[in-house]
């Protein structure tokens, strides 16, 4: 069953987030184990990439569902564009 505006089911999203949680725990273990800095940085980049993929999927779902009249997004095209660009801005401003 799809969840409000999500193409992926809520369970699929939670599974993806659980995998990211596992990756973060792995990074912590690497730091605790005094692993080589470059290896830790590589794993951090992998975590960021996984989160970016999840975020882009949610953004795509939002644009296709919430902003196409089926969700709780803004009603006017201008407000929809503003909301979408604000979300994109938050993603790229880190």
Image (tube, helix red, strand yellow):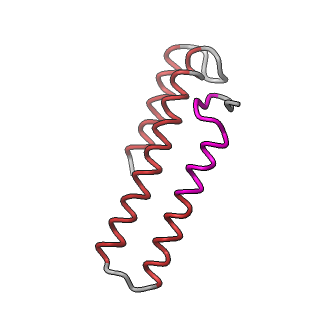
Residue 22 location, x and y as percent? 54, 64
Q: How many marks?
A: 0
Residue 80 location, x and y as percent? 52, 21
Residue shown at the point (44%, 51%) measured from the top left: 50
Question: For the magenta stretch, what is the residue range?
Answer: 5-19
Residue 46 horizontal side relative to residue 57, left or right: left
Depth check, front residue: 51 or 91: 51
- Quadrant in which the N terminus is drawn: top right
Residue shown at the point (44%, 30%) measured from the top left: 85
Residue 81 location, x and y as percent? 47, 22
In the rendered image, the vertical position of residue 47 relative to residue 86, given as above or below = below
Depth check, front residue: 27 or 76: 27
Residue shown at the point (52%, 21%) measured from the top left: 64
- Residue 11 belongs to magenta span: yes
Type of secondary structure dominating the magenta stretch: helix
Q: Quadrant of residue 21?
A: bottom right
Q: Quadrant of residue 41?
A: bottom left
Q: Quadrant of residue 7?
A: top right
**Residue farthest toward the left in the current orientation of the protein:** 38
- Residue 49 belongs to magenta span: no
Residue 78 horizontal side relative to residue 18, left or right: left
Residue shown at the point (37%, 82%) measured from the top left: 35
In the rendered image, the vertical position of residue 44 relative to residue 28, given as above or below = above
């Amino acid at each position: 069953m799809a969840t409000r505006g999500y193409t992926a089911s809520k369970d699929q999203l939670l599974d993806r987030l659980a995998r990211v949680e596992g990756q973060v725990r792995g990074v912590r273990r690497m730091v605790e184990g005094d692993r080589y800095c470059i290896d830790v940085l590589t794993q951090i980049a992998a975590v960021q990439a996984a989160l970016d993929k999840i975020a882009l999927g949610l953004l795509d779902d939002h644009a296709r569902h919430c902003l196409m009249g089926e969700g709780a997004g803004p009603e006017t095209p201008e407000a929809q564009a503003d909301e979408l660009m604000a979300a994109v801005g938050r993603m790229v401003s880190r």
